[in-house]
Amino acid sequence: MTTRRLLLVNGPNLNLLGTREPDIYGSETLADVEALVAEAATARGYEVRAVQSNHEGVLLDAIHEARHDCAGIVINPGGLTHTSVVLRDALSGVALPVAEVHISDVMAREPFRHHSYVADVAVVHVIGEGVPGYRAATDRLIDHVEGR
Ligand code: CA2
């Protein structure tokens, strides 16, 4: 039977959501993001374990733990998207389906944001849809988990 739990991972600096740069990231907070994902998952009969950290190793440990009791991972890796081979290796190593989310349209921003180390280990990509993109990512990830 499928484990009905998802891991939600938010990377460095996403704890600042809603406090600065509202023109890029909107006015919703990290708590709003976590509530939105929990609501979307609950509607489909899933629960969510949420982690945000500014420390790469904390994120890696949470991803490794997920292999024991989660069906998939929704992740906004923040700036680690563009720099981190180790984060990518952790995601690929646990072999769970991954949904990559970016609030902003990274392809319309600086060139250094155009490459994602995570993109080709993710089965769902939601980019530039703002905070509501987390809901779309959660739904599409569950669709994938359930083979829809
Ligand atoms: O658009 C996204 O979701 C990003 O993953 C956000 C990252 C950025 O490095 C990626 O290129 C795109 C940055 C997260 C920082 O979040 C803040 C939120 C409010 C105020 C300051 C930073």
Image: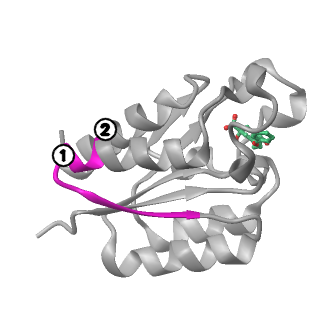
- Could you tell me residue 38's position as x and y percent? 35, 50
Give the quarter of the figure containing the N terminus.
Answer: bottom left
The local secondary structure at tag 2 comes to helix
Residue sitting at x 47%, y 37%: 134
Q: Is residue 106 visible?
A: no
x then y, percent, for residue 60: 63, 74
How crowded pointer 2 is (Cα within 10 Å; few <14, some 14-19, many 20+) is rated as some
Q: Label 1 amino acid?
A: Arg
Q: Which picture quadrant has residue 28?
A: top right
Question: Toward the viewer: 15 or 56?
Answer: 15
Start-end of magenta stretch: 40-51
Does label 2 or label 1 sit earlier along the sequence?
1
Residue beneath the point at 59% across and 80% down: 61
Contact, CB < 8 Å: mark 2 with mark 1?
yes
Question: What residue is rendered at 67% in x and 76% in y?
Answer: 58
Q: Is 89 left, or right, of 137 in this rendering?
A: right
Instruction: Give the quadrant of residue 102.
Output: top right
Q: Can you give x and y, in whole percent of width and height, for residue 52 in the image?
A: 62, 62
Task: Give the vertical position of 53 relative to 42 (above or below).
Answer: below
Which residue does the numbered mark 1 point to in the structure image? 44
Residue hosting label 2: 139
140 in magenta = no
Q: Would you say 107 lies left or right of 6 here?
A: right
Type of the residue with mark 2: Asp
Q: Quadrant of ligand 1?
A: top right
Q: Quadrant of residue 36?
A: top left
Against 112, is 89 above or below? below
